[in-house]
Image (cartoon, grey):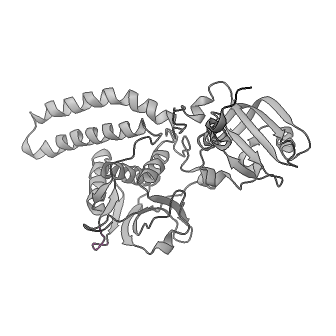
Amino acid sequence: MVNFGGNRPDNGHVLANIPVPVLLIAPDNSIAYANDASEAFFGRSRKRLEGQPTAAVLRFDSERMNNALTSSENDISAQDMELKSAHGSITVDINISLLPGETDWRIAIISPRHGGREHIGEQKDSGQQQAMGAPAILGHEIKNPLAGIKGAAQLLARHVDEKNQPLTELIVNEVDRIARLLDQMQKLSRSEEPELAPANVHLLIERAIRSLRAANRAMPELSINYDPSLPEVLIDADGMVQILINLLQNAVDALKGRLDGVIGISTRFVMSGALREADMERRTVKLPVEIAISDNGPGVPQHIEDELFSPFVTTKRDGQGLGLAIVRNLVQQMNSRIVFERDTQKERTVFRLFLPVASKKGET
């Protein structure tokens, strides 16, 4: 037998980098551990998976299989099972085995079949997972027509009068911004960090509003309430404009057909205690600048509220379900947070962005 001495990889590192979802099930039928592939497959972070009841994470079309999950007496091996997820039903093979010498502890290995890799994401040498494969594919397909749109706008700019020059400039600027964002979408494995820099949130909001007005013939009433004393925030400006456009466009869509529709946009400085309900998955950072976008539309159906930021979840008949998933990814890349709430008393849907303040010169 070959002796590798101290060169053997750590068992935890090996388990984390297995390219299929692996779950450790505790005696109380809760998830005690989830590897990296599980995060991408289920669309949840390890922190959200661990501690959850197994039945809440592994939900099959087969009731017999669901009942078998609660039994810790025997090993389970099943093929071509339909597993329910935020993406719809996924066909998988699943093996659940008792751990020798560990009473009632089990390990579950899930192997997607028939294109399941689309849900897991492409594997990278570093072991990190792409958060979403679909946006990367879309980005590749969209770039060519974008170049044509930009070229047409530049040619058009030579022939329009001075009054309409800002419109052609808007087209060119927006095409460039979208192209940069598509590059980010193709790198959702986060192997490269976004370029964060100090920015004035009110200027970015105004940029988003201009783009929104250009894209929509009819706009609901905007109720704007800015705190002029806010400091600059440390974010990626283009990414933040995209976030704001997505949230504002969702509000516009929610209010279609309503004569009394109002979109609220407000900014304020909040104490860090206001972030206790926010999703602090990485490291603890102070996020005292809040941007709130609200609308008095019908709200989000209750059955999808928990999966609202997952890919391919949408309430729009012609929607792709990528907008809020991209929003969440961009927000996380900026070390910021987003929360959703429904104010039932005021009948308003609210998305709140919490952003970090840029350090002043001389501060560390």
Q: Is residue 174 visible?
A: yes
229 sits left or right of 36 in the view: left
**What residue is drawn where x is 48% and y is 39%?**
189
**Residue 150 in the figure: left or right of residue 183:** left
Residue range (magenta): 227-231
What kind of secondary structure does the magenta stretch mostly adopt?
loop
Q: Is residue 32 above or below residue 12?
A: below
Residue shown at 86% from the left, 44% from the top: 67
Hey, which residue is sitting farthest right in the picture? Answer: 73
Q: Is residue 24 magenta?
A: no
Quarter of the figure that contains the N terminus: top right
Residue 14: image quadrant is top right
Residue 288: x percent and y percent? 41, 69
Q: Residue 4 at what x, y percent from top left?
A: 66, 32
Q: Residue at x 51, y 38 (%)?
A: 130
**Residue 270 sits in quarter:** bottom left
- Image location (x, y in percent) of residue 229: 28, 74
Between residue 356 and residue 63, name the one nearer to us: 356
